[in-house]
Image: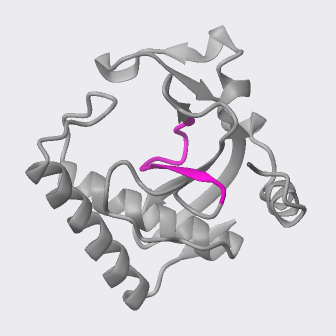
């Protein structure tokens, strides 16, 4: 599913991302996965990816700029935004096992929503565990194994996501 954010949507996403970066700076928080790149861009792109998922799945986005956020990123799901279309869905050790994670790839304002996977299921595959970029180990779910967004929407409609 391809999603393009409007200028107004990008203004909101950029504002949320900027607020996240400032919140992190003033609370002296470091990135959970030892990310050392452009944190401003990372926070804005992450917020834009969340907005794209909310738009595509027609789910509520709380626009949270605090840590820890109240609840999940979008509705009952978590979002991972990655810049390149060939990047896999990354799941970290501290990710809640019951949480469904949606992979959004691209750069604002255009994203491809690639699919989703439960964190706990990903953690059952030691062959997916890697330390890309010298960061702490994480699981990387191959994109061809991601579940359909239609299935996720149906599980949410039925109230089966906790």
| Relative horizontal placement of residue 111, taking residue 68 as reference (left or right) | right
The quarter in which the N terminus is drawn is bottom right
Q: From the viewer's perspective, tell me whether residue 137 is left or right of residue 77.
A: left
Residue located at (11% from left, 50% from top):
25
Residue 49 lies, with reference to residue 124, above or below; the image says: below
At x 39% / y 63%, what residue is drawn? 47
| Residue farthest along the top direction in this orientation | 126
**Quarter holding residue 20:** bottom left
Q: Position of residue 114 (x, y in %)?
A: 66, 52
The picture places residue 9, in percent across and down from the top left corner, at: 43, 84
Magenta range: 76-89
Which residue appears farthest toward the front when viewing the image? 70
Total numbered circles: 0
Report whether 157 appears left or right of 26.
right
Relative to the observer, which residue lies in front, 54 or 27?
Answer: 27
Residue drawn at point x = 15 percent, y = 60 percent: 22
Residue 10 higher or lower than 71, as above or below: below
Q: Is residue 88 magenta?
A: yes
Colour pattern of the rendering: one colour
Residue 65 shown in magenta: no
User: Considering only vertical position in the picture, is 49 above or below 126?
Assistant: below
Q: Position of residue 103 (x, y in %)?
A: 59, 49
Residue at 47 percent of width and 62 percent of height: 49
**Nearer to me, 128 or 54:** 54
> In the current view of this chain or complex, which residue is farthest to the bottom?
8
Using the image as rendered, state which of residue 61 and residue 1 is in the foreground: 61
Q: Quadrant of residue 32?
A: top left
Residue 58 percent coordinates (x, y): 69, 76
């Amino acid at each position: 599913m391809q999603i393009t954010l409007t200028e107004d949507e990008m203004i909101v996403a950029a504002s949320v991302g900027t607020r996240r970066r400032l919140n992190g700076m003033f609370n002296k928080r470091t990135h959970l996965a030892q990310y050392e790149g452009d944190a401003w861009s990372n926070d804005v792109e992450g917020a834009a990816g969340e907005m794209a998922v909310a738009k595509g799945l027609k789910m509520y986005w709380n626009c949270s700029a605090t840590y820890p956020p109240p609840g999940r990123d979008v509705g009952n799901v978590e979002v991972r935004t990655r810049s390149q279309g060939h990047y896999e869905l990354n799941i970290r050790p501290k990710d809640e096992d019951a949480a469904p994670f949606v992979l959004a790839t691209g750069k604002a304002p255009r994203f491809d929503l690639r699919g989703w996977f439960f964190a706990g299921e990903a953690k059952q595959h030691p062959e997916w565990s890697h330390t890309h970029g010298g960061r702490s180990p994480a699981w990387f779910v191959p994109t061809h194994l991601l579940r359909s967004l239609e299935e996720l929407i149906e599980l949410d409609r039925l109230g089966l996501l906790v």
